Amino acid sequence: MVVDIKGTELFRILKEKQLKMVRKIIVGHPSVENAAQSVKEKADGYISKPFNVLEFLKILNKLFEKKTNALLKMVAEIGQVK
């Protein structure tokens, strides 16, 4: 089954299902509307096609590190409260 859906709509659905995911939107046709929608949906970033895969992987790695560090900080703070 093939479903035709805008990336920003898919992003919204996935965000509801997986709250802690890294949210990077990739668009084929960059526009002010797409960028504004990305900000509205609280994306971690916005990238337009075509893009350099190695640079994209570096960006994702930084986002994962940032999310991991934030989670570890939160766990440490909870541990201090106990």
Image (cartoon, rainbow, N blue to C red):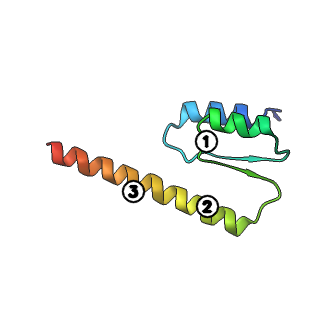
**Real-space Cα distance between discs 3 and 1?**
18 Å
Tell which circle, 2 or 3, labels the residue nearer the N-terminal end: 2
Tell which circle, 2 or 1, labels the residue nearer the N-terminal end: 1
Q: Quadrant of residue 3?
A: top right
Q: Estimate the x, y position of residue 63 in percent, counting from the top left.
A: 53, 56
Q: Estimate the x, y position of residue 48 in percent, counting from the top left.
A: 78, 52
Q: Dots 3 and 1: beta carbons under 8 Å?
A: no
Above or below, 34 against 76 in this view is above
- Tag shown at residue 52: none
Q: Locate residue 43 relative to residue 20 in the image: left or right.
A: right
For the point 71% across and 35% down, which residue is it? 36
Quarter of the picture holding the C terminus: top left
Amino acid carrying label 1: it is Ala
Residue bearing mark 2: 59
Amino acid carrying label 2: it is Ile
**Real-space Cα distance between discs 2 and 1?**
13 Å
For the point 31% across and 47% down, which residue is it? 74
Q: Quadrant of residue 69?
A: bottom left
Q: Locate residue 42 relative to residue 32 in the image: left or right.
A: left
Q: Estimate the x, y position of residue 59 in percent, counting from the top left.
A: 61, 61
Above or below, 72 against 53 in this view is above
Residue bearing mark 3: 69
**Number of other residues with Cα within 10 Å of mark 3, as a class: few under 14, some 14 to 19, many 20 or more:** few
Q: Secondary structure at mark 3?
A: helix
**Number of other residues with Cα within 10 Å of mark 1, as a class: few under 14, some 14 to 19, many 20 or more:** some
Above or below, 43 against 60 in this view is above
Residue bearing mark 1: 43
**Real-space Cα distance between discs 2 and 3?**
15 Å
